[in-house]
Amino acid sequence: MKNVTIKDIAKAANVSYSTVSRALSGSPEISDETRKRILQLCKEMNYTANTVARAMVMKSTKLLGLILTGVNNPFMSELAYHIDRQARARGYNIVLCNSSRNLDQERELFELMIGRQVDGVMIFPAGPESYESLRPYLSHIPTVFIGENLREVPESYVSVDNYRGAYIGVEYLYDLGHRDILYFGRRRGSTTHQLRAEGYAAACKDLDLTPRYCNNAFPATSIKYGYQLAKQLFAQEKNYTAIFAATDTNALGIMQAAEETGLRIPEDVSLLGFDNIRDSGLPRINLTTVEQPKKMMASVAVDSLLDKIQSELAGYSHRILLPTLVERSSCAPLNRED
């Protein structure tokens, strides 16, 4: 089946090649009537634009790269959805890749994005080492980082205030009467998790509470790992009345393990999450959680990247968004008499 070209459209419309090009580019140099007629012919003849040729002429592919650490992570997939929506609203499409928290794979994907001539890249870095790994490439393409792994570097990034989010979570449980609050899922090698743990510790200090931790030795956070860790926790003596899970996926794993163990939430233990992923609001879950404003993060990330694309003098920006508490039914006031 022969590909339809601009010349074929021009012949069918009985206009010049340049007139068709102007119609496709939205040029004001032709009438609306002519443009509508040409665009209708393109639709009828199944014309597909040669994006490579157009990119060479326009010096833009209208493509943005997005590199995430785990597309199967609910928070990441929701963030990708919002970034795609925000990019499309601004006339761009997204090329999505998954680094699997592997620095070598992350670097290969960044090289791939440059080779595909995307206009810019948004990246959720694999770890604090990502900046040094990617620094040789950052001068070649506008880049915006998402998350707090690279907070101190001279590059644009957008994140939520993870420290503050953990702090307000502890305050919320404290106001419900809880004094024995376990932080579940503290993990090394992630600035995001480090800041959440630090916010928890600071709140405990200010409220005169004893910090209690259930550390995560797994390489990532997930429902599966949260479940396995919770099974180990519930086999031990209970010295807490509330659990503050480092992520909602951890909290969902805790719920699964609690149901199997016969531990009732929130009657026997209150449970607080962090992220507010989509599943957290389902009727049988109703998880109280600290929300990362994913839609706003996406909008800020896309706008920051487009600023860099459109102006070489844009410099870099650091945007830290405030988290909010979403109250549902997994936390309950503590009856001190009990």
Image (cartoon, rainbow, N blue to C red):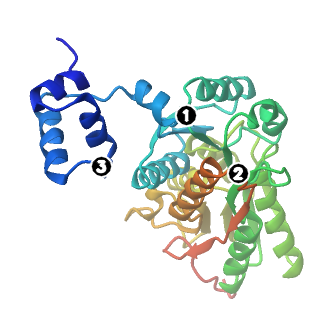
Quarter-wise, where is residue 195 in the image? bottom right
Asked where in the image residue 166 lies, by quadrant, the reply is bottom right
Residue 321 position in % (x across, y down):
66, 68
Q: Which residue is mark 1?
A: 118
Q: Quick one: 212 or 238, which is closer to the camera?
A: 212
Image quadrant for the C terminus?
bottom right
Sequence-wise, the earlier of marks 3 and 1 is: 3
Q: Quadrant of the N terminus?
A: top left
Residue wearing tag 3: 29
The type of residue carrying mark 1 is Val
Residue name at image x 50 percent, y 47 percent = 80
Q: Residues within 10 Å of mark 1 (few under 14, many from 20)?
A: many
Tag 3 near tag 1, CB within 8 Å: no
Q: Residue at x 71, y 27 (%)?
A: 107
Q: What's the residue type where badge 2 is placed?
A: Leu
| Residue located 49% across and 74% down the image | 328
Compared with residue 283, is residue 64 higher up or lower down, i.e. above or below? above
Q: Residues within 10 Å of mark 2 (few under 14, many from 20)?
A: some
For the point 71% across and 65% down, which residue is it?
Answer: 320
Disc number for residue 233: 2
Question: First in sequence: mark 3 or mark 2?
Answer: 3
